[in-house]
Every structure is written in C-alpha cells, then in structure tokens.
Amino acid sequence: MIEQLASFHKYLPSIQSPKSISLADKFKYTFIVLFIYFIMFHTYIIGVKVTDPSVNIISTLTASRIGTLLTLGIAPLIVASLLLQLLVKGGAIKFDLNSQESQKKFQEAQVTFAIIIAILQGLFSAISMVGIDGNGPLVADNFRGNQSVFILVLIQVVLGAIIIIYLDQISTKYGLTSGISLFIAAGVSYSIVSLLGYLLLDESIGIFPNLLSQTGIDKLQFIIIQSIPIATTFLAIVIIAYIQSYKLPIPINIAGQSRKIQLPFFYLTTIPVIFSSALLFILYQLGIAMMSISENGILIDIIKIIGEIFYLMGPILHDYNMNSYIATVIMGKTPILGIPELIHIIIHILSMAILSLIFGVIWAETIGQDGKSVAKLISTNPSVTLEGYRRDPRMLEKKVSEYIDGLIRLSSFSIGLIAGISDALLVLGTGTGILLMISIYERIIPQIIEFLKIYYPKMLVILGEKV
C-alpha cells in the first residue's frame, strides 16, 4: 500500500528539501506560512453563509474553521499520518522504516493519502454545508436551490485542504517546526486571544462595557465572575508548563558509566488526550442525535440509552456567560432523568482521564514505546544495562516496565484529568488546546532564543536573558 501511494506522488507537485538554511530564513518562511494560514482562516467560501462558529475541540485539534478555506484544516494530514503509522507500526502493513529511502517513500505516501482523504472529507463537508441540491443549512441565500453550488463549494474546500498540505511541507522543510504543530499552536493562540477579547469587550457580557454601565457591588461581583476564565487559563498554563518540564530519571549504565535517562512526564506527549478529546466530542454529538430519535420500540430504547451515556460523557457547551454557566452547573439538570449538570461535568472529567489512559497504553504498545519494547531495545545493546541489575532479560523487562509502563499509565491518566478539569473551568482555547500549544512552543522557543542571540541580542537583555 505504501509503495502504491508513493508511486502516485511523482504526478504531484513536490517541495524539495533545502541543502542548508539559515535560522533567519527559517523565521521568514514560518511567518509567510502563518500569514497565508490566517488569510485562509478569514476567507469564507463562495456559496456558503458567513457564520461565526463557536470554538470546539475538533476545530482546535484540526486548526479548522467551518465555512472558510480552512473548513478541513489539518484533518486530512492528521488522519493520513495516524492511519499509516498505526498500520505500519502495528504490523498490518509490512514496510521497513529504517532506511532514508523508505522514510522518503513513507512521507510521499502520506501526502498522496492526505489528498485522497481531503477529497473524501470535502465531499462530506460540502454535503453537510450546502447539500447536493443546494438547499443545505449553510448555503448562501443567493445560491439557494442552485445545484452547481455543491461543486463550487467542494472545489474550494478541497483546494484549501491541499494548500494546507503543501504549507505543512514548506514549514517542515524550511520553517521552525512542522506545519501541523505550527497551525495548531497558531489556532489555539488565536482562540485564546479572540475569546479574551470577547470576555473583555462584548457588549452584553464584556467586562469593560459592563464596567461603564454598572456601579457599586454589582460591578465588583461582575468583574470577579467574568474574570474566572482568564484566571483559570493563566493557572492552567502555569501548571501544565511546570508538569511538562518534570523529568523521570531511569538509572542505567552505559559502557560502565552510571547515567540516568530523563523521560518527560508527558511521555507520549499529547497523543492520548487528543484521541480521547476528539472521541468524546464525536460521541457527544452522536448521543444528541440518538436521543432525538422519535420512533419507539425496544431497539430504539436501547439506542436512546446508549445516546444518553454518550451525552453524559461529553462536555457542557457554553458561551462564556459566567453567570449563566455557574447557574447551569449549580442548579441545571440534564435531559436524562433530571441528572444534575454537576454530575455531567464529573462524568466528563473521569471519561477524559480513563479514555486517555486506555489510548495511552494502546498507542505505546502500537508504536513500540511501552516497557517491553524499550527493554528489548536495551537488551540488544551490550553497552547498556539497568543500574543494579544483571543482564537477565526477564529481570530487565520487569524493572524497565515498572518505570515506563507505570509512567505511561500515570501520565496518560493525568493529562486527561488536567484537560477535563480545564474544560470544566472554562479555560480559553480548551484544556487540550493549552496542552498542545505549550508542548509545541516548548520546541520552538529555544530556536527563537537562538535567533535573538544572533540577530537581536539587545532584545534578550531587555527580556532578562543572558547573552
């Protein structure tokens, strides 16, 4: 499959890797890619009604915006990359990734596969937005009933996705980081800034407009309540950045010298919480659809019960009107047997944590980062031993698994718990978005500091850094 997909790549435009590139040029290409991304983010598709969709976990994870050229965002890239990696590393597809030539073919196959997925997702998106007959929910008024609008929208959605695929390549080869990471970080940052502006300036719930219209104790109470998301966002950033910086030492001997490998607490990065967040949001939407079935019967009743479970696992949707949200949490009831919304939130948080744990264990085993796989890798290297133990493979596997498998379970559960609590506390950009943003910035910031050292050393002095 990889060979066949890679063979089609020669018919597609390709981005050649540079022989060498300066740090200044990396910054230049990164800014160009970001500029194009945000132009697309604000360019609405012809034939689609202009809307201002609320931020959700899917749009955050895929750096997308429904109705614009970024309707699909990086979803085709993510799906193509994850599926091919799972199939290859899981053993479903036999393909050796050890040589440079095979890795090149794998990258080419990903591009081809991403374009195929973009076409398929574009079809579904065009149908959901404007319909095949031109009478969909988001069709622009002057295009309603015109069947050609379906083709027009489809072309624009797919074209936008293909542009993003190539921007990802440009950013990966010429920029500071991969396009996927760059677009997610940019999307989450934009979401935080735009929601902050909404909380501060909105005419109905904004802090500043209400400061001008209210007096006395009501003013102070309103400021405190509406500032909660701002405070929880700042707190989430500090806590996540601190936890992410923590390293777990594993004592090993390398060629007779005692050293310690430092494993990050978020050993699998944000992969477990990405899977769990996306799945819970999809299940939540599916649950609402299942609960709304009007027919009767035993099978329908079972489907509705499953839908109710999916609903309770999902988040509470809100518009950052804090008085309304607090009232909902304290006194609100779900449509399911009058279960309080507070119970709904607790179920959502636990679902995030448990699913992250499950996905973390599965993902580690699939890609060979679990304790057993790492122990096998260590045992094949005669110069590497676990401190205090002989090279007995069974003992080595037992001790390494204690460290790594325990870390996988703890970190996966913790990252899901943090994301779930952050969502409940209305963290701007969602808890998962903050986790992704910090992990991405952690890789980019050292390059920014290096750039400033070379070209703008005085700026570092102003920022308190030693040159």
Image: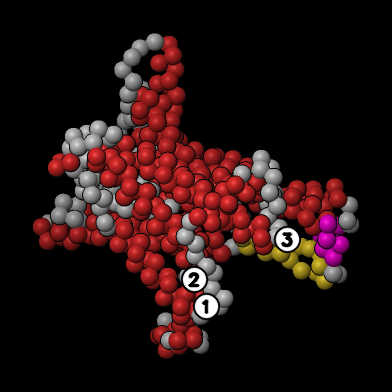
Q: Earlier in the sequence, mark 2 or mark 1?
A: 1
Q: Nearer the viewer, residue 83 or 439?
A: 83
The picture places residue 42, in percent across and down from the top left corner, at 27, 57
Q: Residues within 10 Å of mark 3 (few under 14, many from 20)?
A: some
Per the image, label 2 sits on a secondary structure element best described as helix
Residue furthest top in the image:
297
For residue 21, the mark is 1
Q: Which mark is residue 174?
A: 2
Specify the amino acid type for callout 3: Ile
Residue type indicated by callout 1 = Ile
- In front of the other: 58 or 96: 96
Question: Outermost residue, front direction?
Answer: 11
Residue tagged 3: 250
Asked if residue 382 is among those painted magenta in the image, a careful observer would answer yes
Cα separation between marks 2 and 3: 35 Å
Q: How far apart in space, not on screen, are marks 1 and 3 (Cα)?
A: 36 Å
Which residue is drawn at the image coordinates 61% and 44% (left, top)?
A: 1
Rendered position, 293 above or below 229: above
27 is within the stretch colored magenta: no
Q: Nearer the viewer, mark 1 or mark 3?
A: 1
Is 371 displayed left or right of 157 in the figure? right
The residue that appears at 86% across and 70% down in the rendered structure is: 256
Q: Would you say the magenta stretch is mainly helix, strand or loop? A: loop
**Which SS class for mark 3?**
strand
Q: Where does residue 448 sit, x and y in percent of width and height?
A: 47, 76
